[in-house]
Amino acid sequence: MKRIIIFASGSGTNAENIITHFQKQKTAEVTHVFSNNLRAKVLKRAHNLGVRALHFDRESFYDTNDVLNVLKDAQPDLIVLAGFLWKFPEKIISVFPEKVINIHPALLPKYGGKGMYGHHVHEAVVRNKEKESGITIHYVNENYDEGAIIFQEKTPITQNDAPEDVAKAIHQLEYKYFPIVIEKVLGLRKVIENN
């Protein structure tokens, strides 16, 4: 059984989707959910689904090895960032090379970097009259949104779409593809069908 750890900062709908996907599949399990936000709904969602939910602060993430030591003890096969807003420390990436992935709500390299998350991305996409947006799942390196791309999927945008409409379309792509891309990265799936 492959072991997955999720990091999230907000409501945790992607985390919940991933947890329930693997609870049904029985090929991998989410063993822990970590959040840097004590009031994040993701902690309650994880708890309700029987997954260990842990909160940490900036010091234990960056200045000490507290979070790193918990990760080492847990021995994850994959660390998944699902709406996690802090920059991931190099010291963790170096211990888990090619084992940390992130989902971004745009077609990187467009609309990536510090401060580009959630509604900020969708507002920029609409403001620039883009004809399409999408999701990018990529490996995490020491820079925001610059790791090697694993998977992208697009959705069209019309001139009548508001940022909220784009957000809904992006969420649907995230829910559909994130769990199966995780399966592929873990070697549990050979192909990802685009339809």
Image: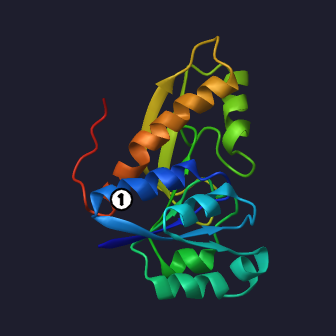
Q: Is residue 171 above or below residue 195?
A: below
Q: Is residue 141 above or below residue 52?
A: above
Disc 1 is placed on an element classified as helix
Q: Is residue 6 above or below residue 54?
A: above
Identity of the residue furthest to the top in this view: 160
Q: Is residue 77 above or below residue 6?
A: below
| Residue type beneath disc 1 | Phe
- Residue sitting at x 43%, y 36%: 153
Q: Which residue is mark 1?
A: 22
The colour scheme of the drawn protein is rainbow
Location of residue 6 in the rendering, given as x and y in whole percent from the top left corner: 53, 65
Q: How many marks?
A: 1
55 to the left or right of 178: right
Asked whether the viewer can see residue 140, the reply is no
Location of residue 118 in the rendering, given as x and y in whole percent from the top left corner: 67, 42
Q: Toward which corner of the image does residue 36 lie, by quadrant?
A: bottom right
Q: Quadrant of the N terminus?
A: bottom left
Q: Toward which corner of the image does residue 88 lie, by quadrant?
A: bottom right
Sort mark 1 into few (<14), some (14-19) or many (20+) by Cα contacts within 10 Å.
Answer: some
Location of residue 81 in the rendering, given as x and y in whole percent from the top left corner: 55, 60
Asked whether the viewer can see residue 129, the reply is yes
Report the front residue among 166 and 13: 13
Q: Toward which corner of the image does residue 55 lie, by quadrant?
A: bottom right
Report the front residue among 67 and 20: 20
